[in-house]
Amino acid sequence: MNISNRFLTADYRDGRVRIGGKSYSAGIYANHLLNQYYKNDTAARLSVFKQYGWLVAEQLEHGYLKTHDYLLAGEEIQHILDTLPKLKPFDTLNIEAERKRISELFTESIAKSIIDFFSIRAEIAERDEGQVLFDTFPDNYDKKKYKIISTTISEMQRTLSFYNRISNDMQKAFAELSAFVSRANEASRLDEAHLLPIALEIFGETPSPLNVQYVPYKKNAKNQAATVARRLYFDSYYSFVLTDFFEGLHYGHYPRKCEICGKFFLMTSARRQRYCTGTSPYEVRGKKVSCRTYAASINRKELAAADPIVDIYTRRCNAIRSEKSRGTITEEFARAALELTKEYKLIAQDDEEYAKKQYPRNMKRDNLYTETDKRLK
């Protein structure tokens, strides 16, 4: 890969990755893909824009080019660049600089130069033995220009390869990372030595071509002295995600799925943590809490299975029975309220979106009793 194309690059040092001037734990971008894959249907949106990219890639491989297809391939990439900032790390990269590079690469004048190049190359290939012996070239052959266009075609092929593959790269990486997360608990200990065999079985020995440069690296703005970091230039999104995953795994960083909110989080220790520290979709006494706090509040620690739907249902039913025994609500009202709570529970078990957002609100005392009262009337 020509390192002059610096669109997707990352610096790695001591279990950290730096992109766009910000530093995070290595492995974070593999985790981001797991959380963002379905958001805005990014991969599906990108897969639409590769018809002409594939056509032009095939044309270049066979030594010809259609200007119309070439220009439309450039437009497709510009549409891809509209969508990419919705996915990390592209939201921190210089999208405008990449837009400019693409607009300057996919022009009629460059298309004509490439077509002329193929024509001259065909003439050179048809030289007879005498012309070859005396290095005789066609009159329109310009050695310097020929070399420039040859370099441009190479850059074009790398560019088309990157954008033509990006949606498939996302799909493949997401499937493999999901498989890894689902199998991680097979390891007797969640560290590199025990997780690596599982990772290698899933990812295989897929080659990950990239270009490496060693650069000075300061851990933070206060550091006066710089250390050496590896700056990696990626020729595909898949090679980037794969590198980020294995760089993280080397330092004990690996993705896990929270059993409360269903989101993925990056672990940095060998603990069998089952809940993240993000905000839980369920409340405790009307207050928002973290998933770990919520799990603890319902007496389901890290080693216990959690079912927040049933927990909310059980606590509300107990409260209804308690009020009935105290005489604050009638037996008829209590029976209707219990039927309604069961109805809400069954809906929540079939509808994840409802379970996370509307179910906790419906099960609050005031809301439940208001709806019960309406039904009795």
Image (tube, helix red, strand yellow):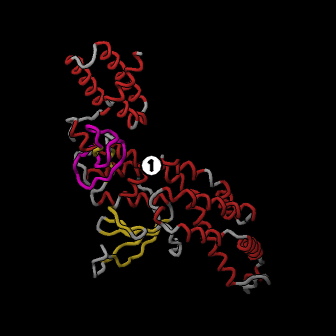
Q: What segment carries the magenta color?
A: 261-287
**Can residue 125 be seen at all in this image of the molecule?**
no
Figure quadrant of residue 58: bottom right
* Residue 45 placement, left or right of 248: right
Please tell me which residue is depicted at 30% across the width and 56% down the height of the picture.
253
Please tell me which residue is depicted at 41% across the width and 67% down the height of the picture.
19
The foreground one among 253 and 128 is: 253
Figure quadrant of residue 57: bottom right
Residue named by callout 1: 174
Q: Is residue 315 above or below residue 243?
A: above
Q: Does the magenta portion include 293? A: no
Q: Is residue 336 above or below residue 210?
A: above
Label 1: which secondary element: helix
Where residue 48 appears, as percent x and y from the top left, is: 62, 50
Q: Residues within 10 Å of mark 1 (few under 14, many from 20)?
A: many
Please tell me which residue is depicted at 47% across the width and 49% down the height of the picture.
37
**Can residue 319 be seen at all in this image of the molecule?**
yes
Figure quadrant of residue 25: bottom left
The foreground one among 149 and 124 is: 149
